[in-house]
Image: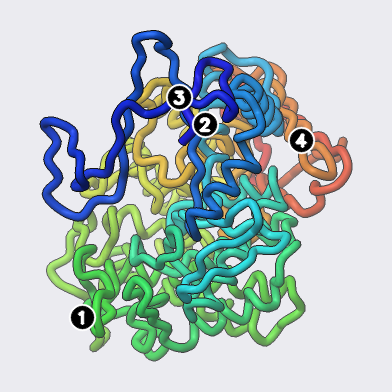
Amino acid sequence: MTPGGRSADATNPRAFSLKGVPGGPAVLPGNPSTGVQVGAYASFDTVTTRTVVVRLGISFTSLAEARRNLALESLRRPFDRLRAAARQQWRAELGKVSVSGGSPRLRSLFYTALYHALIEPSTLSDADGSYPGMDGRVHRAGDAVQYTDISGWDVYRTQVPLLAMLEPRRAADLATSLVRDARQSGCLPRWPYADQQTNVMTGDPSDPIIAAIYAFGAREFDAQAALGWMVAGATRPCHTQNGDYTEREALADYLRLGYIPQEQDTNAVGHTVGSRQLAWGAAATTLEDAVADSAVSGLARRLGRPAIAARFARRGENWQRLFDPRSGYVRPRLRSGAWLAPFAPNGQTGFVEGNAVQYTWLVPQDPRRLFALMGGAGVARRRLDRFFDRLNAGPDRPYAYLGNEPTLASPWLYDSLGAPARTSAVVRRALLGLYSPTPGGMPGNDDGGTMSAWWVLGAIGLYPMVPGTDLLAINAPLFARAIVNLPCGRLVIDAPGTSPARPYIQDATLDGRRLRSSRIHFDPLITGVHRLKYSIGANARSAWGRTG
């Protein structure tokens, strides 16, 4: 640490008046150390100069690299210049989406959310590219930054697609980081932090993360190698001593039965620890694995691997094995094939941070088949209408829980029912009613920028509906104009007349051609200048988008 005055630099340091390590020779009064701790403290004489500037060099590899990082990134520049450079860098980041119209409060909400959505993942590699690998060795990242702190179960739904749109190079490095983790540990991670695996949450989220990064145009990584690791983790058991982590729990049963039986269910505390390798939420994990399988299929198809694509497309249908036609819900099932009884739709047994009512909608890869099993589009729409009577009811209520990940995509299911007006109405209620520009202004944990990215995507009216693909479901934008500045182009979204009281699309054009569908693909928009233009109204009587 190099302390100094307001504009001081390393040439004018101030000495510590007190320093130490908790539990070491000196302990701060009133704070006795009772165990092993990592940290340090320091204080300064502020009688003469009250302002203190502290510079920290951080490294995950060595003290020498920490000093090198400090020298390269901070030491030669005064604090004021560093602050100005950081401000300018964030101004450029936030300028990747420019919105106009709407109230100052809504614009503040938008840029707060965009800022939060772009913070993660964290950089693990040093300025010279060195980083600690999951094999316990120091590696070099080369041209690709090594990232960590990847909240996989959360970010695959919203934050990663947004990152891939706006910062494809950073997203590609994220994919490269996951592949490196697999090479060093044997398994694609679920929630890596630093050089460690964790068992946080459930499913196999690296699959939709990597597939989405590629689908949204970020392709500066070894996608064939990534596909190889995705297939390996989905076809043979993979367990690492690093973190006592299993990539796909209860895989043998999933491969044999097409679902994970309730006998393999456990809670978060017992999640995959030791040799049992049980699934936290057997039914929830089955649905998440089917989403991951569908994402593997999509990437294989894009890479010209039709056999793999077909095989995993079939596996992406495994969710149907847990759909109980009598109850009309996805339901935990025993190894014998019998349904778990007793059963309450709002019960959480077999699910993760949610219940059967909420998880039944977690079939983004094939919503029309889900609607058919429910009894048809009319039945499905009435059920969705009841579902959204409450927007953030919590994990034990038979309504939406938009403060958590499993139901984040559910408002856009109306698009697949030919009722995009209902999507716009529900999304608008959530954008305006569940979020505010205050310290407690989110309906749930941001989870690596997931909730913030949800707000950004909803506000510009483009939602990544099918994980691992570039398919975007449309809703009415919140702002009169949004300009998405892409690395090789620009997408201009015009919605004149939009307001909190006018949430309905009456008509839409893309580059002057009328849009009949409420879904578009991002891939054709990556290069060049494109314009998505809406006619917005106060009523839902328009026939636009009813054909899906």
* Residue type at numbered disc 3: Arg
Q: Which mark is residue 485?
A: 4
**SS at mark 2 in the image:** helix
Asked if residue 506 can be seen in this view, the reply is no
Q: Which residue is more in the foreground, 498 or 95?
A: 95
Q: Which mark is residue 472?
A: none
Give the label, 4 or 3, closer to the camera.
Answer: 3
Q: Earlier in the sequence, mark 3 or mark 1?
A: 3
Alpha carbon separation for disc pair 2 and 4: 17 Å
**SS at mark 4 in the image:** strand
For mark 1, what is the residue?
Answer: 263
Q: Earlier in the sequence, mark 2 or mark 1?
A: 2
Alpha carbon separation for disc pair 2 and 1: 41 Å
User: Taking 451 as reference, is 376 above or below it?
Assistant: below
* Residue type at numbered disc 2: Ala
Q: How is the image coloured?
A: rainbow
Expressed as whole percent of the image width and height from the top left, the position of residue 227 reads 63, 77
Q: Earlier in the sequence, mark 4 or mark 3?
A: 3
Alpha carbon separation for disc pair 4 and 3: 45 Å
For mark 3, what is the residue?
Answer: 14
